[in-house]
Image (cartoon, rainbow, N blue to C red):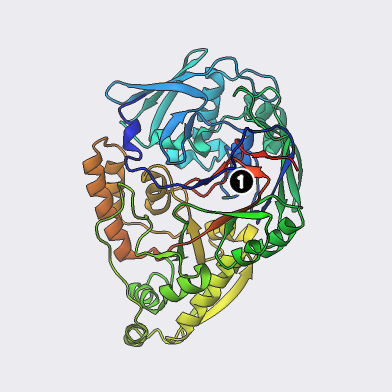
């Protein structure tokens, strides 16, 4: 489909799939349990992690991904690059309607992309697209031409995620600022009801364009306070599916003959992050002391039963952009105490957020023990899981555990977190040389050159320490044995559009 398509992920990620033998049957409701941080169901405004598993059911993306992160057609059935990669031409599927009956066409695509680019919209995806897309034209009813400032290979991966989810322009006009409570897409499920703090209910789209899909009559997302409560509800049949279980969470699930466990792909990346440009975290000696004080193998043993992978960076093994070498920070509390003493940092108070979710709360507690032991004074500050990321972005939380999942192109996480103008740069990190390397890497189609640049970028970040990497977790998806067709994805976002439930 394009010369750039193969650049996104040339080494396929290993993936696991679990589905029972047999022909899918229609009917039934899938009850999903999740620790929700959902704030909006408008894909143009969405920024929270859990929102995506709901959005991916109601909205289709222009481009889709396979379980190994390779690309496949979505609402765009094909695409071409012209003008030496500076024009991207999307050829859209025909005969598709939004849930409100209005047509999906080139004008709708233009509206969606223009809306994200408009500063007045305040889209969470604007910084990903501005400076990349210079114009969008509806060439004809089913063809869209996107003008680019320069060749930009990562755009395909962006259009397979939130930036490519297509919302109804008519619904946006009708509901205005309340569009996030009245989502209208083209996906396999239609919005039904949202009881905040309790449930989000979706029902089958009987007019879905993809054959006899979906199989389920409904999907209901249930807010749960913890995975343990979710598993208890699963054991009595109230919930069918829960993701993000660490090995400790799985013990109860293993005791039930009605529950299957499916391991995730390479787990999310866990770290401690701080306001890199704000005292006391702007002191490189403090950051270095924390790095040597943190017993990451102990964290791995306690949080993930030793099944996670301690890492000095944020990219797992097996990707073409996995770095060849990074700065290493061995656990050395004696060295950490010396650094603290030499820098006059004894007794420095660090206020560490302790999100209410099981894993992040435990992580905070373990970090406090390690840092207190070398002469720092860590004060844990409890915060609801649903609020901690928004408060981190707003700057009211300056020291917190954090987790991120992978993207289908390195630019999707590296620019997002580490560019000075990155959409999710909540650390205040800025390094002009890193910015320069990121800009060059995101506009070249030479994979060897991109690899060299990403090696340099990741090495420099590991020296600057805007995050203190811990590693990649071991996580599981739990589901009742009646659930079929689930495939674990590398970005840890469960996709339910292909799921079906056996009867009885």
Q: Is residue 329 found left or right of 412 in the rendered image?
A: left
Judge by depth and name the residue closer to the eye, 376 or 91: 91
Q: Where does the image place residue 95, in percent across and percent down from the top left?
A: 59, 15
Residue 89 visible at all = no
Where disc 1 sits, the SS reads helix
Q: Where does the image place residue 151, in percent across and percent down from the top left?
A: 31, 31
Judge by depth and name the residue closer to the eye, 166 or 283: 166
Q: Please give the name of the residue rendered at 60% of the width and 19% of the height, measured from the top-left corner.
A: 96
Q: Is residue 217 found left or right of 83 in the rendered image?
A: right
Judge by depth and name the residue closer to the eye, 145 or 304: 304
**Residue bearing mark 1:** 51
Q: Where does the image place residue 259, in percent across and percent down from the top left?
A: 65, 55
Corner quadrant of residue 344: bottom left
Judge by depth and name the residue closer to the eye, 116 or 187: 187
Crowding near the residue tagged with mark 1, few <14, some 14–19, many ≥20 C-alpha atoms within 10 Å: many
Q: Quadrant where the N terminus lies?
A: top left
Q: Please give the name of the residue rendered at 42% of the width and 73% of the height, measured from the top-left corner.
A: 296
Residue 316 visible at all = yes
């Amino acid at each position: 489909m394009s010369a750039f398509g193969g650049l996104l992920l040339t080494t396929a990620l290993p993936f696991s799939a679990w589905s029972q033998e047999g022909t899918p049957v229609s009917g039934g409701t899938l009850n999903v349990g999740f620790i929700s941080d959902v704030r909006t169901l408008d894909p143009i405004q969405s920024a929270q992690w859990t929102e995506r598993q709901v959005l991916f059911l109601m909205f289709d993306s222009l481009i889709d991904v396979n379980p190994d992160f390779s690309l496949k057609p979505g609402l765009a059935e094909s695409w071409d690059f012209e003008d030496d990669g500076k024009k991207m031409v999307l050829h859209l599927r025909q005969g598709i309607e939004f849930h409100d009956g209005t047509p999906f066409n080139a004008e709708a695509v233009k509206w969606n992309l223009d809306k994200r680019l408009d500063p007045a919209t305040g889209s969470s995806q604007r910084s990903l697209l501005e400076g990349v897309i210079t114009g969008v034209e509806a060439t004809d009813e089913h063809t869209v031409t996107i003008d680019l400032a320069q060749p930009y290979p990562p755009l395909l991966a962006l259009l397979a995620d939130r930036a490519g989810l297509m919302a109804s322009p008519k619904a946006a006009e009708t509901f205005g600022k309340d569009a996030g409570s009245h989502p209208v897409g083209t996906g396999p499920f239609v919005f039904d009801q949202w009881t905040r703090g309790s449930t989000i209910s979706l029902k089958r789209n009987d007019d879905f364009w993809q054959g006899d899909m979906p199989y389920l009559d409904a999907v209901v997302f249930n807010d749960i306070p913890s995975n343990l409560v979710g598993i208890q509800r699963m054991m009595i049949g109230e919930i069918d599916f829960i993701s993000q279980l660490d090995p400790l969470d799985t013990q109860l699930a293993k005791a039930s003959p009605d529950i299957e466990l499916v391991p995730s792909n390479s787990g999310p990346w866990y770290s401690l992050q701080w306001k890199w440009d704000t005292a006391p975290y702007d002191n490189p000696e403090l950051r270095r002391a924390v790095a040597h004080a943190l017993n990451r193998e102990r964290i791995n043993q306690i949080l993930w039963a030793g099944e996670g992978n301690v890492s000095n960076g944020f990219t797992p093994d097996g990707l073409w952009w996995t770095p060849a070498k990074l700065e290493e920070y061995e656990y050395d509390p004696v060295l950490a105490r010396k650094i603290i003493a030499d820098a006059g940092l004894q007794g420095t108070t660090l206020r560490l957020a302790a999100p209410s979710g099981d894993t992040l709360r435990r992580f905070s507690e373990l970090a406090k023990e390690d840092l207190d032991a070398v002469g720092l004074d860590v004060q844990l500050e409890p915060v609801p899981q649903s609020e901690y990321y928004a408060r981190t972005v707003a700057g009211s939380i300056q020291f917190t555990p954090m987790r991120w999942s992978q993207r289908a192109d390195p630019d999707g996480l590296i620019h997002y977190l580490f560019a000075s103008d990155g959409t999710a740069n909540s650390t205040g990190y800025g390094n002009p040389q890193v910015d320069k390397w990121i800009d060059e890497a995101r506009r070249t189609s030479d994979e060897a050159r991109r690899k060299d640049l990403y090696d340099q970028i990741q090495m420099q970040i590991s020296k600057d320490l805007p995050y203190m990497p811990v590693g990649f977790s071991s996580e599981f998806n739990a589901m009742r044995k009646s659930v079929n067709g689930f495939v674990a994805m590398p970005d840890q976002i469960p996709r339910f559009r292909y799921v079906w439930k056996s009867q009885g």
